Image (cartoon, rainbow, N blue to C red):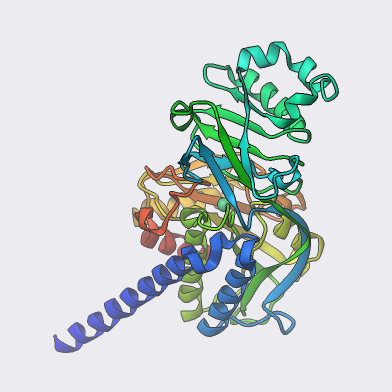
Amino acid sequence: MQLIWGISFLLSFQLYSQSRQVKEFTKTLCSSEFHGRGYVENGSNIAADFIGKTFQEIGLAPINGTYFQEFTFDVNTFPANCIVKLDTHLLQPGIDFLVHPASGSTCNSPACPDGRFFPIQHLQGADFLAKKLLFLNSNKVFDYDKDSVLIVSLIGCKDTEIKEIRAALMQLANSRPIVEITNEKFTWSVSQTAFLYPYIQLKEAAFSTSKGAIFLNIENKFLKNFQARNVFGLIKARKETDKTIIISAHYDHLGRMGRNTYFPGANDNASGNGMLLSLAENLLLKPLKKYNVIFIAFAAEEVGLIGSEFIVENPILPLKDIRFLLNLDIMGSGEEGVTVVNSTLFDKEYQLLCKLNNKKKALKQIKPRGPAANSDHYYFTQKGVPSFFIYTMGPNKHYHDVFDTFEELSFDAFEPLSKLLAAFIRKL
Ligand SMILES: [Zn+2]
């Protein structure tokens, strides 16, 4: 009795400490020291070092003597001032306003390196659309406009109109500062191009208090050839083989928007890296017999799947040796189960996953979905590598915003999903 108690105590302690390490790892990736794992303050590479070090510490092996693969790309960033004031009221970045990912600087506006108050030219979306061509061809006609901010309200516009207005405003952002007024949920992203002038998205509620003056001090820094790194680690099969299973998750997120605002990217995708760690711990206890397992933490997914595209073009193993790739993103909830992208392409594997789930009663549902170019599995799928992209579903709707914090993660399905995925991998 005592012995059994001892064993179960040890086992539960081990499981407890494992999940605690996974949560600590996830939390660390979300911390301000990682700067939103983007390109300001080298956040992406701070994360890469941390993940590489963790892979080494838990016992994953390097591949060809390294845990890293470096590549470069251009990216627009906001390392310094992102200040918007309406009259004297200072607005909150990420809450009252977003700086468009491709925004330029107020320094490009005439004579205002430190920002300043601008006169306002304010139009409703429909009025702007009616005069769109005039605006787009008016650089000379309306020279005085260059010194004012063009504010266009998207409130009440149809989706097609919003698309058309935004396309025109993005063009105009190369000749004058732009503000759009919106009620949409803020969803930020990363851009590889930059306008000459600032482009701000402003919440209607914040704007309605304005009496007619707007202060802008926006500073972008366009980085040429930013060096980022994919991170990986290997568990060799018990039997000598080239055949390999890949488990991947992107670690990059959106970075900083100005000095005091960063996007923690907890669900997207610190949680996926937590799941990588959890699966690595599981598979290290007893490596697979027939397959090597390579864990890959991809960089630059949010910029446009750049890290995974690079590794597909510069593979660390022949792509034909990959038995299956399991790409994981948004692993922090799961109250409503998971979605499996590519399930329609790989029915045998999908049926296996469902069968195991029925047996283990792990998740509420495993929702099938066809192919989609929405994460790092995509370029592998294009090259004929069998793959799934799995993400959890639940009430946490924070996505690409400042509220996607560690504290908002429920980890509701994390343990059962980790066990289900491990069992799935062991049955492949
Ligand atoms: Zn993501």
Residue projecting furthest to the left: 1
In this view, the residue in front, 180 or 277, is 180
Residue positioned 57% across, 22% down in the render: 153
215 horizontally vs 398: left or right:
right
Q: Position of residue 366 (x, y in %)?
A: 45, 45
Please indicate, yes or no, whether residue 426 appears anywhere in the rendered image. Answer: no
Q: Position of residue 325 (x, y in %)?
A: 63, 59
331 sits left or right of 315 in the view: left
Q: Position of residue 77 (x, y in %)?
A: 67, 54
- Measuring from the top left, give residue 114's x and y in whole percent: 65, 50
| As drawn, 122 above or below 197 | above
Query: In terms of image quadrants, where is residue 171?
Result: top right
Count of numbered tags:
0
Residue at the spot 18% in from the left edge and 83% down from the top edge? 5
Judge left or right: residue 337 versus residue 230.
Answer: left
Residue 13 in view, yes or no: yes
Taking depth in this image into account, of 394 and 366 the one nearest to the observer is 394
Residue 106 occupies which quadrant of the picture?
top right
* 249 is higher (above) or lower (below) than 257: below
**Residue at 46%, 74% in the rendered image:** 282
Q: Quadrant of the C terminus?
A: bottom right
Residue sitting nearer the eye, 70 or 108: 108
Q: Look at the image and tell me in which quarter the N terminus lies.
A: bottom left
- Is residue 42 toward the left or the right of residue 273 in the image? right
